[in-house]
Image (spheres, grey):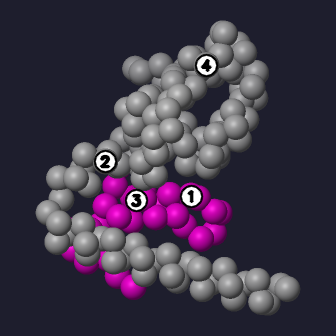
């Protein structure tokens, strides 16, 4: 199945099969945006703790590394895939939580509002013409049906 031209952004939000949720991001600008999104979400998480040291202890990192991970600037550390999943697990967040738009996380925090499940802002989706949205939704439905079928096949083989 190939993604039609103009919908390449969809590749960056679809899960890869090998390691569960891993994102397939090939565009360096998208990757930089993902790191920044994770940094903002991690700062939001950090605000739930009394101190940086408490947050660092919870996620299993030194306070120094955690500080560099949360800062912007020359000496910052990016939050990679494995660390992002470890932070989410340690803080009781669902897989992919750090990859979601920090603005939607802040809005949904403490409310029953549904969090946007993709790693690009909802506003980008809403700016698409309806025809492109329908096409993307159809491609996503196809992806989901293939994923469900693969899961059923694996269950039959192991069960």
Mark 3 or 4: the one toward you: 4
**Mark with earlier residue (1, 4):** 1
Residue 139 in magenta stretch: no
Element at badge 4?
loop
Q: Residues within 10 Å of mark 4 (few under 14, many from 20)?
A: few
User: The C terminus appears in which quarter of the rendering?
Assistant: bottom right
* Distance in Å between CA atoms under marks 2 and 3: 14 Å
Residue under numbered circle 2:
122
The residue that appears at 76% across and 21% down in the rendered structure is 57
Q: Residues within 10 Å of mark 2 (few under 14, many from 20)?
A: some
Residue under numbered circle 3:
12
Splitting the image into 4 quarters, where does residue 131 fall?
bottom left
Q: What secondary structure is the stretch in magenta mostly built from?
A: loop
* Distance in Å between CA atoms under marks 1 and 4: 26 Å
Residue 22, labelled with which disc? 1
Observer able to see residue 64: no
**What stretch of residues is rendered in magenta?**
1-28
**Mark with earlier residue (2, 1):** 1
User: The N terminus appears in which quarter of the rendering?
Assistant: bottom left
**Mark with earlier residue (3, 4):** 3
Residue under numbered circle 4:
48
The relative height of residue 156 versus residue 84 in the rendered view (above or below) is: below
* Distance in Å between CA atoms under marks 2 and 1: 20 Å
Element at badge 1?
loop
Element at badge 3?
helix
Mark 2 or 1: the one toward you: 2
Residue 24 in magenta stretch: yes
The residue that appears at 41% across and 30% down in the rendered structure is 107
């Amino acid at each position: 199945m190939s993604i039609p031209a103009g919908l390449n952004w969809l590749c960056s939000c679809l899960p890869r099969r090998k390691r569960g949720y891993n994102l397939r991001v090939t565009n360096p600008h998208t990757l930089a945006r993902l790191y920044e999104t994770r940094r903002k979400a991690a700062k939001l998480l950090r605000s739930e703790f009394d101190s940086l040291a408490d947050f660092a202890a919870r996620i299993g990192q030194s306070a120094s590394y955690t500080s560099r991970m949360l800062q912007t600037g020359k000496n910052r550390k990016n939050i990679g895939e494995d660390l992002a999943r470890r932070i989410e697990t340690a803080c009781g967040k669902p897989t992919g939580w750090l990859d979601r738009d920090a603005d939607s996380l802040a809005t949904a925090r403490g409310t029953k509002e549904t969090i946007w499940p993709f790693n690009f802002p909802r506003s980008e989706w809403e700016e698409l013409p309806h025809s492109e949205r329908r096409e993307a939704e159809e491609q996503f439905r196809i992806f989901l049906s293939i994923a469900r079928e693969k899961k059923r096949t694996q269950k039959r083989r192991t069960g």
